[in-house]
Amino acid sequence: MSKLKPMIDSTGEVRELRTEDLKKFRPATEVLPDSLQRKLGVRGPQRAPTKERITIRLSRDVVQRFRATGEGWQTRVDAALRDWLESHKPAN
């Protein structure tokens, strides 16, 4: 097999990848240490997604107060909204 060329040339430009380069690639789960994978939040797909990813705009003070409660604050926002729905009827 031929010797692989460096990925970056003398000017710092990345060269185009060749088929032989791609054959050398391995999944991140095989090459990254477990500690780094945990920090990156590598996780598998949900078995049965129970929540929907959305974008929502909330007041800064509301978000700050929930974030101040620590990890899991988004779950607590979800619980607060669910609790509110039990005693209120959203406007149409």
Image (tube, rainbow, N blue to C red):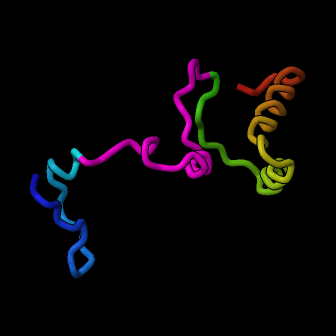
Which residue occupies 59% across, 37% down?
Answer: 54
Q: Position of residue 58 (x, y in %)?
A: 73, 48
Which residue occupies 27% across, 77% down?
Answer: 12
Q: Which residue lies furthest to the bottom in this view?
A: 11
Q: Of 72 and 19, which appears nearest the observer?
A: 19
Which residue occupies 81% across, 36% down?
Answer: 76
Q: Position of residue 81 (x, y in %)?
A: 80, 31
Q: Of 38 and 16, which appears nearest the observer?
A: 38
In the figure, 63 relative to 88: above or below?
below
Q: Which segment is the magenta one? A: 24-49
Q: How many labels does the image show?
A: 0
Q: Of 31 and 82, which appears nearest the observer?
A: 31
Q: Residue furthest front?
A: 1
Which residue occupies 60% across, 42% down?
Answer: 55
Q: Of 84 and 23, which appears nearest the observer?
A: 23
Q: Horizontally, is 36 left or right of 28 in the view?
A: right
Q: Position of residue 21 (x, y in %)?
A: 20, 52
Q: Horizontally, is 86 left or right of 21 in the view?
A: right
- Quarter the C terminus occupies: top right
Q: Horizontally, is 66 left or right of 23 in the view?
A: right
Residue 36 part of the magenta-drawn span: yes
In the figure, 81 relative to 26: above or below?
above
Q: Residue furthest right?
A: 87
Q: Position of residue 52 (x, y in %)?
A: 60, 29
Residue 66 part of the magenta-drawn span: no
Q: Horizontally, is 9 left or right of 90 in the view?
A: left
- Asked where in the image residue 88 lies, by quadrant, the reply is top right
